[in-house]
Structure formats: structure tokens, C-alpha cells
Image (tube, coloured by chain):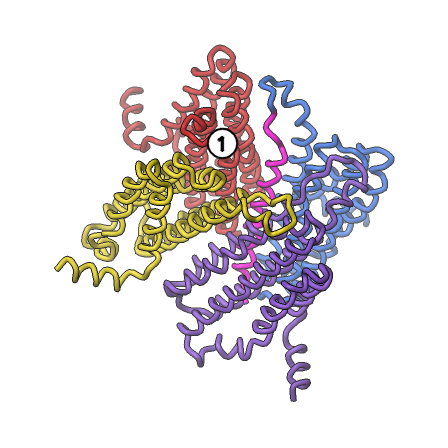
Chain colours: A yellow, B red, C blue, D purple
Amino acid sequence: MKTSRIEAFSDGVLAIIITIMVLEMKVPHSVDLAGLKPIMPVFLSYVLSFIYLGIYWNNHHHLFQATEQVSGGILWANLYLLFWLSLFPFTTGWMGENGFASTPTAVYGFVLLMAAIAYYILQRAIIAREGRDSLLARAIGRDWKGKLSPALYLAAIPLAFVSRWIASGLYVLVALLWLIPDRRIERKLENHEA
Amino acid sequence: MKTSRIEAFSDGVLAIIITIMVLEMKVPHSVDLAGLKPIMPVFLSYVLSFIYLGIYWNNHHHLFQATEQVSGGILWANLYLLFWLSLFPFTTGWMGENGFASTPTAVYGFVLLMAAIAYYILQRAIIAREGRDSLLARAIGRDWKGKLSPALYLAAIPLAFVSRWIASGLYVLVALLWLIPDRRIERKLENHEA
Amino acid sequence: MKTSRIEAFSDGVLAIIITIMVLEMKVPHSVDLAGLKPIMPVFLSYVLSFIYLGIYWNNHHHLFQATEQVSGGILWANLYLLFWLSLFPFTTGWMGENGFASTPTAVYGFVLLMAAIAYYILQRAIIAREGRDSLLARAIGRDWKGKLSPALYLAAIPLAFVSRWIASGLYVLVALLWLIPDRRIERKLENHEA
Amino acid sequence: MKTSRIEAFSDGVLAIIITIMVLEMKVPHSVDLAGLKPIMPVFLSYVLSFIYLGIYWNNHHHLFQATEQVSGGILWANLYLLFWLSLFPFTTGWMGENGFASTPTAVYGFVLLMAAIAYYILQRAIIAREGRDSLLARAIGRDWKGKLSPALYLAAIPLAFVSRWIASGLYVLVALLWLIPDRRIERKLENHEA
């Protein structure tokens, strides 16, 4: 089994999820700039989720580029990841429309957490197939980002009830961790650890 | 005629159907976890339909991997399958929003039944083209799942008016039948039959 | 310039149009079968448009299979076709929700007519590029269906104000013309003409 | 890293954006042609945005055809472009539903401007990778359209508050600039400059 069709299907689902989120940004009835003001939190949550989905697409793209064969287990691990990502428009809309209120912000983090776990499972399934000495296994390495991110989500979920800004700040932080090019940070961290 | 474009188009339609179903899960106005409670049946019906569409995508993927040439008949059989699958968001929403009420649950089963028949027709059309001794014909074999599933849907439709939980339980059962990896079950069943 | 990306983009747009039309079929609030009754005309118009889009996808697929090179003119002729097809969900919804009332049914026919003209322009643009002796030019031949269809749409538009059933009957007739496999009809017609 | 998957994903997103805009054109409750009248500005803004997205798809297609390798920077520059394009349905709906009122028309221009800048950044990122003497760098040349367009958007934004027709006229003008085949205009402009 080749990877091309699983990539095409995932691309389709990700493209639709990313675009459907915009539909949560309802066209305002007001005609002046003030009409955009109540939409700002929805817009900000859209930007955040867009970046997250961009990161997932990016990582997914790299993951399957290093994959040569697809098994039934990988197909389902991939669908499981897509399932959690498909809930992004819902949690993004709920968080945005309520100005980052505690519960929706915590639920947003929960879905982020589940997607991160699903991604981890997918990665494991592929490495199990490709072998521990494969290019992919070596490329992923110790995967400190993949381990730090769920920890930060886990912290953010209860913290959302303390302050919505701490929780959403943590979501932004994780996104930045992934956005900033890998090598330099990793080198820095290695130096820091040494 | 090659299979690549029919696969790409089907992937597109399946990806959209799977994602559009989320739109039936309307963002609640309430800001606490209780706001999610009325959405739970919609969420559960979404999960069920997501799994079904995942199974269809999976099987479709395998089916066309074993297909070499596409005829006009196959194109239309494929579109006929996509037609019934395209009704999933509607029946999923109707069943979910009404807490698995009898009629919507029966109609959900009817669409499952029609999709299963459409899949069977597609399989027949491809085997007719590929030949009875082809790799595909041998791989499908006696196709006990493909024959048992419509029978279970047929049973579930009237049973929905007896108890909604029997009907939806049967839908879950069929989904599990397809989710659990093939070989072991088939071997067991063969032993059972012997 | 190769045809693969124009095919992929068209597949995407067609897949979305075909699936978005379902969203016009609003989930009923009623829980019994009677709740489906007011949706029936929407459902019927959905079926009709699904078949039309299936035919367009099918023909588009064949058209580009015989095409080797894509020019700027072909790209825009293709987008012009997609534009008219993108109006299908709107006219389908308007016609269906108003029980095939005269004006929406006429407007539905107008969009069918414009799409047919756009398809004709696309075909011309491709033949102009491929050459009059190309495989494609010979395959299309006299293209009696491509010429008869717009004539029938043109007749249906005013007839919608006489009887909605004549107009929608004509739309069904054109769909059947394209659905029934080519060769036999063509042979019959040739015999009829001879 | 090859370009095929970045193209497939972009095609998906563009196809969905272009099709989702139609959903802003709500099916009228009225059954006569007068029912279409209030939709006309929405329809016109849809046509304009459809053409713009067609131009972006077209240019994107050409851009990546001349690209051989994709870097992380290019992936993100591409996502940044898709982000601004994903706001088209929102601004198109806002402008259309309010009959091209000043503020929505200015905001529409702002999103056009940001998309143009994002496209410019993407082009730079690709040229930086491909080299200043690459086929692409030479094909783009002085890129007078790419420089004139943002200037015209910048002019249109304040002018929307003077007259909505000047601003939207400028948007139409830029679209025409890109629609009309390149060579002749460029030659004319070069003669004019000489």
C-alpha cells in the first residue's frame, strides 16, 4: 500500500477543516468598523487554530514523506488524528464566540491534547512499521516538542479556570514552539541540558 | 481509463462529507460544560458516522488499489455510492438532534442499507471488469461482512420502533465488525463453520 | 503545462459543490416520517443536480483524458465552467424549497444553459489547442448531445411559466440522454438519420 | 521535498474557499425574479472574488510549476497566503450584503492588499531558494503587475470612503489587469516607457 492516497485524503480533510472554521466568523449586520469588534475574539481564535492546523499539516507532510508503506493500523491511526482535528471548528467557534471563557478554553485545550496524543500514536504506528533504525525514527529522535506539548496542554486545561489568559497564552506558546525553525532551538536546548 | 482521478474525486467527496457533518454540531450559547450536554447525542451520532465513513474510505481505498481499469459503469456505480454517503450528514444530524428517536434512527439505517447495496454494486461492477479469477475477486472471497451488514441494517430498521437502543446497537456492531482486523475473525468464523 | 493540476482543482470544486448542496436539505424538527414530506421537493432537486454534476464530472474526466497540453485560455474556460456549476447549490435550493415554482425552475434552467455553453467553450478551446484531427476532435464528432441539450434548456425556460412539470421533465430528459451509454443511441440516431 | 503535496493542499483550500463563498448567497424566500434583486450585490461581489481566486489559483499554478524544491519557509509563506485568501468569503459576504458600503468595501480592499503582500513574500521565498538566475526569477522579471496591484489597493482603501464605486472600480481594474493575457500589455507598457 502506497502513501499517496492517505496523503490526498488527509490533505482534503485538513483543507476543509481549515476553511470551514471561517464560517464561524458570521458576517456582521453593522456597516462600520465597530461591527468587527465583537468578531475580534472569534478572529483571534481562528488565527490560532489556523496556525495549529498549519503545523499539523506541515508535520503530517514530513511524517508521510519519510513513510514508505502504509498498514491498516496506520490508516486508522490517521483517521483517529483527523477525527480530533475535525473538532477544531467547533471548539474554536465556542471559545471565540464566548471571548475565551474558562470552560470553552479548557475544552479547546482538551481537543488539542487529544489531537497531540493521536499524532503521537500515528507516529508510533509508522515507526513500528518502518523500524527503529529507519530514517524516520532517527529524524524524530527524542521528540522533545512532541512530549512537551501535551504536558503544556494538560497544564493549561485546569489553568483555564484560574485565568483564561494563562491557558490561551500556553496554547500560543506551544504554537510558537513548533513555528520557530527546529535546529537552532534544539541546539540551544542541548547546550542547556549539557 | 485509469483509477487515479476517480480515487481523487471520491477522496474529495468523502473528505467533505466527513467534515461537513461537524457543522451539525452547533456551537452552544451556554459557557459551561452543561452547555455540551444537549450536544452529546449529536456528538455520538457524529462519532458513529465518522467511523462508518472511515470504513467506507478504507474499503474504497483497498477496492481501487486492486482495480486496474475503470469503465463507464464503474464511474456511475461509484457516483451512486457517493450519493448515498452524501446523505449521511442529513441523517446523522436528524438522528442526533432528536436523541436517537425511532423514525430518524430507522431512516439512518435505511441510508446505511442503501450505501451498503451501492458498495456491493460497485464491487460487482469492478469484478465484472477485472474478471472472476482476478486478484480482487479472490481477495473479496465470500465477502461475509458485505453480506451480513445489509442483513443487520434490514433488521435494525423495524427494530428502531421497538427500541432505539437495539437499532443503534446494531449499527455500532456492524461498525465494530469492520473495524476489527479481518484475518483473525475470518479464521475464527471458518473454524466455527467447520 | 500538464493537465494534472487543473483536473485536481476541478475535482475539488466539483466534489465540494456536489456535497454542499446537501446542506440545503435542512434537518427537520419533526421526528416522524411526515417531517420528511416538506423536504421531498428539495430532495428531488438534489437528486437531479447530483446527476447533472455527476455527468459534468464524467464528461470533464473524459475531456481532459484526451487533452495533453493546457493553455491559459483553457484554464480560464475551465474556471468559467466551474463558476456556473458553483451556482447549482443556489438554484437547486431555490427550486426545491419552493416546490419547483415557475421562476426558480426557469432560473435553474438558465444556469444549466450557461453551464452547457461554458462546457462547449471549454471543448472548443481544447480542440483549438489539440488540433482538428486530434483524437479528441474525432471522439467528440458531431456532438449531437452537446448541441441538443442547450436547445432543450432554451425551450424549458419559457415553458416553466406554462407548466413547471414540462420544464423539469425536460431537465430530467436531458440528464437521461447523457446517462444512457453513448454508442447504442448514437447508432440508432445515425440509422434514423440515414 | 517535492511540490506535489503543497500544490494539492493549496488546490483543496482554494477550491473550498471559492465554493464556500456561494453559501453567502442565501436562497430567497420570494418566488419571483424580484426575489433575486436584493441578492444582486452579493452575486456581483461573488463574481469579483471568484475572478480574484481564479487569478490566484492560476498564478499559484504557474509559480509552483517553475519551482523544484520546497523549504520550510516556502510552506509557511504558502500557508500565510492561504490564510488571507480564506478571509475572502467573509469580506465578500460583508461587502455584498451591505451593497458595497464604504467600510466593508475598504476592508475587502485591505484583505486583497494583505493577500497581494503574502503572494509577494511567497514569490520572494521561492526565488531565494531557486536562485536569482533561475527560470522563475527570469519569468517573473520586473513583475510590474505584482507591484502595481498593491498600490491600487492602497489607493482604493481610503477612496472607499469618498465613493464606493471608485474603490470597487479599482478592484475590477486590477482583476482585469491580471485577466488580460500578459504579453501584449507588457509589450505596450514597455513601448510606453521607452
Residue D31 in sight from this viewpoint: yes
Q: Residue flagged by tag 1: what amino acid is it?
A: Pro
C109 relative to B55 in the view: left or right: right
| Residue closer to the observer: C102 or D78 | D78
- Membership of C19 in magenta stretch: yes
Indicate the position of residue A93 as horizontal and vertical percent values: 48, 40
Instruction: Please report the residue visible at 31 percent of the width from the left and 33 percent of the height from the top.
Output: B181
B103 relative to C187 in the view: left or right: left
SS for tag 1?
loop
Instruction: Look at the magenta stretch and give its main secondary structure.
Output: helix
Q: Quadrant of residue C38?
A: top right
**Label 1 packing within 10 angstroms: few (<14), some (14-19), many (20+):** many
D169 relative to A135 in the view: left or right: right
Q: What range is drawn magenta here?
A: C1-28
The residue marked by circle 1 belongs to what chain?
Answer: B
The outermost residue toward the top is B162
- Membership of B127 in magenta stretch: no
- How many numbered marks, from 0 up? 1
Indicate the position of residue C32 as horizontal and vertical percent values: 60, 17
